[in-house]
Amino acid sequence: MKIVALEVCPLTGATVDGGWPQGHEPQENLHALLLVRTDQGIVGWGSCYTSGKLVTGAIQLLWPLLKGESAVEPERVTEKLRQSSFWQGRGGSVEHAISGIDIALWDVMGKACSQPVSRLLGGNYREKIKPYGSILFDEPEPLKRTLESVVARGFKAIKLGWRPFGRRNRQFDELLIRTARKTVGDDVELMVDAGGSEQFWPHGTNWARNTAEMLADFGVVWFEEALPPDDLEGYIELTRVSPVPIATGEVLTRRQSFLPWIERRAVDILQPDCTKNGGLSESRRIAWLAFDHNVQVVPHGWNTALGLAADLQFSAAVPVARYVEYLTPCAYIDEITTEPFEVDGEGLLSIPTRPGLGVEIDADKLKRFCPERIVFQ
């Protein structure tokens, strides 16, 4: 089965605020879907966490290497792309595009084998997993209303991130966490993402340690991105002394970038993002390296329906997986598939068991967010 065409589908019109200080508009394009077509009529879908123009530029580089390749050998084909683009890629938008291609090829292979991707990744350790509703911090009153709406959707875990947490003073940070805990009660798990990958992050290890001590008082499950993403030594020290587990890894690409974080035990929880880091192939390798070093893995996903589907398949095949990230509300998750994801009464998501990623894109719904596609053939 050969690859004969590839389509880039930039998503715009309902882009969720990512918390950056420059603000955002719904018309921003931060996600792109990929559609791989084969000579036997099977199509596979993938997702990239980067803009359509950057993905298109990367595909212009990669398409001569991809056209006519096997559509059912995702690991070999995407490693070929990676090895053949070191001078232009080795991370960044080229790796993000390879990520979407890899996810799409796993979708193709699953459909060709009539199996869910999780089984092809090694087997199913679970049928359901807990999603955590992923939201931004806000002023106390609007934050309270947002939390109430997320709980009303059935989520039993919620992650709060970025502004204004860590941007004002310690007393205000504690007020936000106290407001969150009081609003959701003790039965809903809370995670906190400081957003240390924001440009010119001002805080260091001492701030992070003191903040972690405060978070521990409120039973926070983990503390994410407390430091800038390149501060390996800072994370090693913070993980050693923090009373709550420390998480990071969403900006890393390629398995080699994760190795020092795993081998030096720089984190308690590693967060590979399969729409950035090389796809499901790389995420699987990263997860098993982490597992062998007794480091927890929770996939990062500021996501689309296809990214979430990929995270679900990935998490089914990881022995110690406990959570998936669920950006909420998000039209790119909730409004482009033929069947919506549903959180059950226990706050869990069922992992799709249909062939491939297990979800189907509704072409008419997708047109609302992707009126034009860029085609390579």
Image: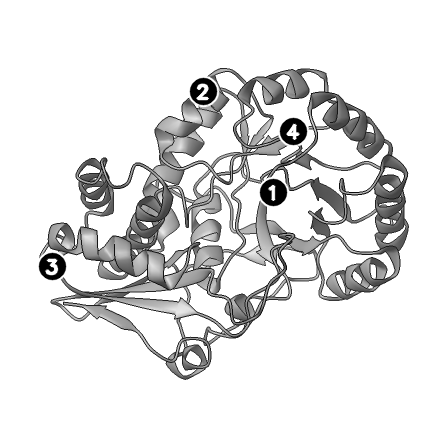
Mark 1 lies on a secondary structure that is loop
Label 2, residues with CA under 10 Å away: few <14, some 14-19, many ≥20: few
From mark 4 to mark 1, how far is it between C-alphas?
A: 18 Å
Residue depth check, mark 4 versus mark 3: number of the one nearer the observer = 4
The residue lying toward the viewer, choosing from 273 and 314, is: 273
Q: Is residue 317 above or below residue 333?
A: above
Q: Nearer the viewer, residue 289 or 66?
A: 66
Q: Which mark is residue 372?
A: none
Q: Are marks 4 and 1 in contact (CB under 8 Å)?
A: no
Can residue 367 be seen here? The reply is yes
Q: Real-space Cα distance between discs 1 and 2? A: 22 Å
Question: In screen coordinates, is 141 left or right of 116?
Answer: right
Quadrant holding the N terminus: bottom left
Dot in front, 1 or 2: 1
Q: Could you tell which of marks 4 and 1 lies nearer the N-terminus?
A: 1
Marks 4/3: CA–CA distance: 43 Å
Q: Amino acid at mark 3?
A: Lys
Residue drawn at x 19%, y 52% is: 61
Which element type, helix, strand or loop, lies under badge 3? Answer: loop
Q: Which residue is mark 4?
A: 246
Instruction: Tell me the number on the disc at residue 260.
Output: 2
